[in-house]
Each structure stands twice: as C-alpha cells, then as structure tokens.
Amino acid sequence: MYIRKKDTVVVITGKYKGRRGRVLEVYPTTERLLVEGVNMMKRHTKASRGNQAGGIVEREAPIHVSNVMAWCEAAGKPSRIVMKRLEDGSRIRVWKLTGETLD
C-alpha cells in the first residue's frame, strides 16, 4: 500500500464519494484505512472509567484502500502514487501526475 498515515485521500466510490479526509490509521493486513469523517458508524457503549456517560458514540469505520485515491495538493486533484528507486537504493513515493516527491 502506498497510502500512509497523515496522507490526504478522496473517496472515489460509495456513500461518501467525493469527500476528502486525512488518514488516521492504516491496516495493511486487511488493506483498509481509517479516514477522518468518512464511513461514520454509531456504536452503543457502556459507561466506564474512560467514558463516564456511555450512550451512542459516532466514530469512523475502516474503508477499503481500493475505494480511496490519494489527493495531490499541488495539482488540486487525485493522483496515483508510484515508488521510485534512487541511486543509493532507497525508495521514495512520487506523485504520478506531477512527478514531485511526497516525503
């Protein structure tokens, strides 16, 4: 997966299509992402030490990586990410649209 934590992505399919958000967590084994403000679900929680009130809590659910695309701020539209190998053997992430590096 080329998308990492703190990247900005746009949802390209589903109920939240067109919505942009920041990646909060990445789950590489299941190929899913937790995106801020996307795929919201309601969770019924009991009162506990951490959550004194309890009740219905709304939070993000993981979304599959194939349903999102990385957002390129320089171009102002979504773009793919490709890996380029440098002369010293290290790899960097590069926007396919503009050719600029991400990191």
Image (cartoon, rainbow, N blue to C red):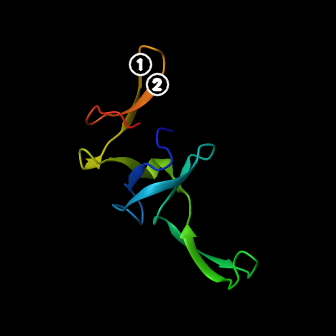
Above or below — where is 16 with respect to 28?
A: below
Q: Give the residue at mark 2.
A: 91
Q: Residue at x 48, y 21 (%)?
A: 90
Question: Which element is circle 1 on?
Answer: loop
Closest to the observer, 76 or 48: 48
Question: Which element is circle 2 on?
Answer: strand
Taking the image as shown, residue 94 lies to the left or right of residue 33, namely left
Q: Residue at x 62, y 82 (%)?
A: 56
What is the crowding at mark 1: few (fewer than 14 residues within 10 Å), some, or many (at least 20)? Answer: few
The amino acid pointed to by label 2 is Arg
Closest to the observer, 78 or 7: 7
What is the crowding at mark 2: few (fewer than 14 residues within 10 Å), some, or many (at least 20)? Answer: few
The amino acid pointed to by label 1 is Leu
Q: Answer whether labels 2 and 1 touch (C-beta < 8 Å).
A: yes
Q: Position of residue 2 (x, y in %)?
A: 47, 38
Above or below — where is 84 with respect to 27?
A: above
Total count of labels:
2
**To which quarter of the image does residue 102 belong?**
top left
Q: Position of residue 86 (x, y in %)?
A: 41, 18
Q: What's the CA distance linking mark 2 and mark 1?
A: 6 Å
Name the image quarter holding the C terminus: top left
Above or below — where is 53 with respect to 83?
A: below
Q: Residue at x 33, y 61 (%)?
A: 18
- The disc, 2 or 1, on the residue closer to the chain's N-terminal end is 1
Q: Position of residue 26 (x, y in %)?
A: 56, 49
Residue furthest to the top in view is 87
Closest to the observer, 14 or 83: 83
Q: Give the residue at mark 1.
A: 86
Q: Position of residue 22 (x, y in %)?
A: 44, 56
